[in-house]
Amino acid sequence: MIIIFLGPPGAGKGTHAAILRAKLSIPLVCAGDIIRETIRNKLKFADELKKFTEKGLLVPDELVINIIKNRILSDDCKNGFILDGFPRTLVQALALEEIKIKADFVINVETSDEVICSRILGRRVCSSCGAVYNVFTEMKPRVEDICDVCGKDLIKRKDDVSSDVVMKRLQVYQEETSPLVDYYKNMGKILTVDGAEPLNEISEKILKVINGDK
């Protein structure tokens, strides 16, 4: 089974993708995590990737397509996977089609810009294990600035620091990524959910669709 999550940054798609991964026991391929890991470890393309992410811009299609292709063609993805943050453009969606990767379900998570701004500015990420928290929501850590999972420090991602960068990312999403909603809607594969609803309610809706429940 192949599942794609769409939605603007901060809408909650990463959180729901992680919940679904645990339910379905298939890999979660998060484009953002792969890009940040590449930059953090100063791997190939790190400097080029950094120039785009710190400005809130999308990484060029050719670059991100090559990175994601290598991951989803790995052995552990043979029985299915979940994509979060890819595709982000029609060119990227067509690149999946070219390598015979066809989504079974596309989950589109939507919410208001105001909610998104609050979530992103309140987001904290573990500097060690990558666990995600939010100081403004129910996802607060038990101890301020400390990861519940491994006890390491929580940090703000560089692209989460200012409201100007956040708004730029939302603008880029509307221009580059929102057309994918119509693309997958025309295929009859899309489910749109309200990212402002409680986590458990959204998860239940997604699982019902995937399981074929009415």
Image (tube, rainbow, N blue to C red):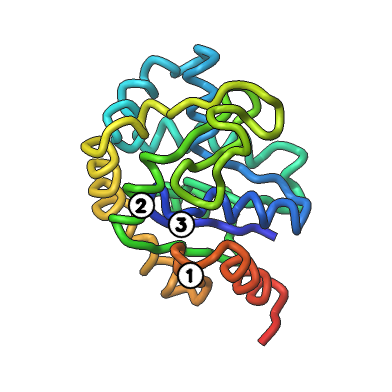
Q: Residue 116 carries which label?
A: 2
Label 1 is placed on what type of residue? Answer: Val
User: Which class describes the residues within 10 Å of circle 2: few (<14), some (14-19), or many (20+)?
Assistant: many
Q: Between 92 and 163, which is closer to the camera in this rendering? A: 163
- Image location (x, y in percent) of residue 112: 32, 61
Q: Between 153 and 169, which is closer to the camera in this rendering? A: 153
How far apart, in angstroms, are the residues tagged by discs 2 and 1? Answer: 15 Å
- The reply to whether the C-beta atoms of the residues labelled 3 and 2 are less than 8 Å apart is no
> Disc 2 or 1, which lies upstream in sequence?
2
Residue sticking out furthest to the top = 42
Could you say whether the residue bearing mark 1 is in a helix, strand or loop?
Answer: strand
| Residue shown at the point (35%, 48%) measured from the top left | 118
User: Against 205, is 169 above or below?
Assistant: above
- Image location (x, y in percent) of residue 114: 29, 55
Q: Residue 193 carries which label?
A: 1
Q: Which mark is residue 90?
A: none
Q: Which of marks 3 and 1 is in front?
A: 1
- Image location (x, y in percent) of residue 126: 58, 28
Say whether residue 83 is left or right of residue 1: left
User: Against 203, is 87 above or below?
Assistant: above
Label 3 is placed on what type of residue? Answer: Leu
User: Which class describes the residues within 10 Å of circle 3: few (<14), some (14-19), or many (20+)?
Assistant: many
Q: Which of marks 2 and 1 is in front?
A: 2
- The reply to whether the C-beta atoms of the residues labelled 3 and 1 are less than 8 Å apart is no
How far apart, in angstroms, are the residues tagged by discs 3 and 2? Answer: 14 Å
> Disc 3 or 2, which lies upstream in sequence?
3
Q: Which of marks 3 and 2 is in front?
A: 2
Q: What residue is pinned by disc 3?
A: 6
Could you say whether the residue bearing mark 2 is in a helix, strand or loop?
Answer: helix
